[in-house]
Amino acid sequence: MDKLMLMKTANEVRKDIVTAVHSAKAGHPGGSLSAADIFTYLYFEEMNIDPKDPKKADRDRFVLSKGHTAPGLYSVLAERGYFPKEDLKTLRHTGSYLQGHPDMKHIPGVDMSSGSLGQGISAAVGMAISAKLSNADYRVYTLLGDGEIQEGQVWEASMLAAHRKLDNLVVIVDNNNLQIDGPIDEVNSPYPIDKKFEAFNFHVINIDGNDFDQIDAAFKEAKTVKGQPTAIIAKTLKGKGVSFMENQVGWHGKAPNDEEYKIAMEDLEKVGEALCQK
């Protein structure tokens, strides 16, 4: 898929995120929107997957370690054809298979149930070790929040990943600088994030995580790395694409009302129209 199509698809994913969270009257739009470009690149360009065969043995695996941004993952899965887009409107509703956090038993395309912060990366490391032990060539990707990496378990998993030389593992940190209680450097600073992963013997790439050229270059570079895992530190804008949500900590975990939903969709429609002019 070319860059323009990726940008258009990511914009559709953002519309889906806002629609799902609005319909649920709850959820986490901010970090879903900041990571929308990364979700889109992974599922439309990077990963070896097949929506018609979600459990195929040689598929690449993805673990959403920051599981509260499930609206972002569900939206890209729906756009990719894993389940009907219409189902996104059932997010968090009683009886819906689209729960507030990813559920591998009921949602096609979800490789790991997640939501307890810090734990997803451990599951991803386990998957990557399994591939090595089985001589399988699938790759494993995991997306972490920058607030999430305040969890000690993240670094225990990273230590093991480097020790086992897991060059089939790519850890992505969505560095939007905001967590539920405020800026991450004010709550409990994990900076410098890149130097920490380097100290744990990762190959580290710093990018603008909302720029498809840089995203593309980073994942291509990760594929060339041998003998160590890769960490992509993706600087992003929380709430990206929706004017009143951008870089606003209050939109970490609340849903837009009807009026706000209308404004958000108008914002994203304008982005879409601008992309169509290109």
Image: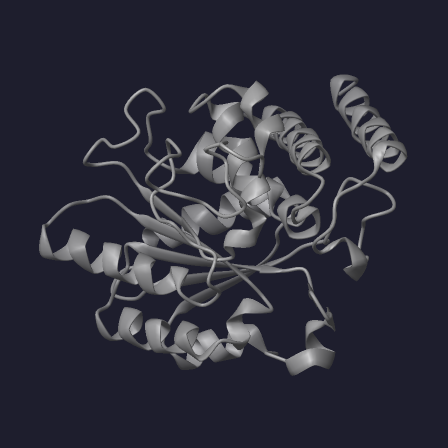
**Which quarter of the figure has residue 53?**
top left
Horizontal relation, residue 65 to residue 126: left or right: right
Residue 1 visible (yes or no): no
Residue 203 horizontal/vertical position (percent) = 40, 67
Vertical comparison of 86 with 245: above or below: above
Left/right placement of residue 214 relative to residue 276 reads: left
Residue occupying image coordinates x 39% and y 53%: 222
Residue at the spot 78% in from the left edge and 61% down from the top edge: 249
Q: Measured along the vertical axis of the image, is residue 197 above or below residue 205? A: below
> Horizontal placement of 15 versus 110: left or right?
right
Looking at this view, is 39 or 26 the one in front? 26
Q: Nearer the viewer, residue 191 or 89?
A: 89
The quarter of the picture where the C terminus appears is: top right
- Seen in the picture, residue 96 relative to 168 is either above or below; the reply is above
Figure coloring: one colour
Query: Toward the viewer: 264 or 46?
Result: 264
Q: In the visual, does 213 lie left or right of 78?
A: right
Q: Position of residue 188 (x, y in %)?
A: 64, 82
Residue 54: quadrant of the picture: top left
Residue 179, picture quadrant: bottom right
Seen at 18% across and 35% down, the residue is 57
The spot of residue 169 in percent (x, y) is 32, 57
Query: Where is 130 relative to 118, above or below?
Result: above
x%, y% of residue 152?
Answer: 44, 79
